[in-house]
Image (cartoon, helix red, strand yellow):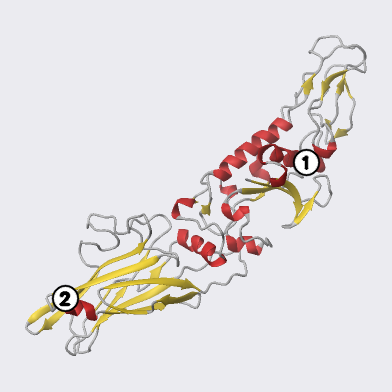
Amino acid sequence: MKKTPRGWLVVALSWVVLASGCKCGDGDEGGPGTGGSGPPLAEDSAESGGREVTLEITEVFTRQAGTAPLRTSFVTQEEMVARARVQGGDAKLAEAIRWTVRPVGTHTGPAAPAEATGAELVFRGSSALPLTGSREPNQPLEYEVVASLALEGRTLEAKLPPTTFVRQEEADILRQEYVDYGTQFKPTLAHVRVPGRPTLNRGNYTVIVEENPGELDRLASDLEAEVNRLLNDDVQVVRVGAQAPSPSSVVVSPGPSVLMLGPLGDTEPKGDDVCAGKRINNGCSGPILAGPNRIADTLANNRKTQVKLETIITSAYRNPQRNRFVGSKSIDSRHTRGMALDLDPRFLAIPGKDASHLMCIVELAGIRLVGEDDSYSENGPTTFLDCNDEAADHVHVER
């Protein structure tokens, strides 16, 4: 142990918890938090009154209601705790330990309290991060925590290598945004995850928040299935090989009406059957007629169109800072809660369908899943349009 002639014992506490999942304090040393009943995190000692006196930092953790204190990262709503003890001296020396908490960087707000006395330090941080919107991840909030003890004019000092800061991990940097913006939904760690599909993450971090974990994957899968049903919903009116009443008889009829567009065909005529509608994008967009021989030669839905919605997702999960950056006026947007998708199908190459057809098909698929109030066409973040309006640039679907 080193001895110096100054009059304070200074112990600087620090840790960095990585987003990959640190289980700090959950090791063989025993005890909750960082340290616990195992070896001290930092210590120093000197003789006082003929006895060796040692100051030890024993624990550092974030206190969360209903959970064991195993974590050292934090958000500012949570209490952070550091504990120290004095070995070999008067028991009252622990009451004289002085703590000071200093923010690191202008983006970190002051701690409350910034100073305390005793064997245990309990404080909360605060945020000075801007709320102007950004495409970049926020910096982590960080604090320097110092414990000191006056001991007979001597200075004993011990520091934890290699740094001297309390620092947020990625999951809590993301959660902090919800605290800073004052959203109704405040995610816990259980709401933070790596998305099943990378295209569902349109935020600033490698992880996303979902109010209902797994909801975005389910919404994307359900919507994709419904879109593909709509692209293959023609009806066989006359059995293939059977005779129709006349050459103009419908043998394959488009399915139900697609919003204000009416029925849209998904079948190519075979034999001498005839396409009765317009040909769009190299495909028949209307019903199929029996043709001169009056025999139904065409099987409904023979194009077997299948689309993957991942290719047309323009936005899904957005963290609050990213949500503000793109112009959203709602701090409680479903995008920030992992419950919404934006899709632009206009450039899909689907036989028989143009851009307005595809916009309306995706909107109708959403309506069938979530209802009219939660599936609609937009231009930008706030303009609501008919799906066949030329200005519409995406369909928004939310749960």
Q: Is residue 48 left or right of residue 126?
A: left
Identify the disc placed on residue 54: 2
Q: Quadrant location of residue 114?
A: bottom left
For the residue pair 127 and 352, the one nearer the viewer reads as 127
Q: Is residue 288 above or below residue 20?
A: above
Q: Amino acid at mark 2?
A: Thr
What amino acid type is highlighted by mark number 1? Cys
Taking 360 as reference, is 191 left or right?
Answer: left
Q: Quadrant of the C terminus?
A: top right
353 over 184 or under it: above or below: above
Residue at image coords 59%, 69%:
131
Give residue 343's position: percent from left, percent from top.
Answer: 69, 47
Binning the other alpha carbons within 10 Å of mark 2 as few (below 14), some (14 to 19) or many (20 upward) gives some
Seen as rendered, the residue at the extreme left is: 50
Answer yes or no: is residue 1 visible: no
Give the distance between the C-alpha atoms of the residues marked 2 and 1, in whole angstroms: 74 Å
Vertical side of 141 occupied by 117: above or below: below
Q: Which residue is mark 1?
A: 360
Q: Residue at x 90, y 26 (%)?
A: 276
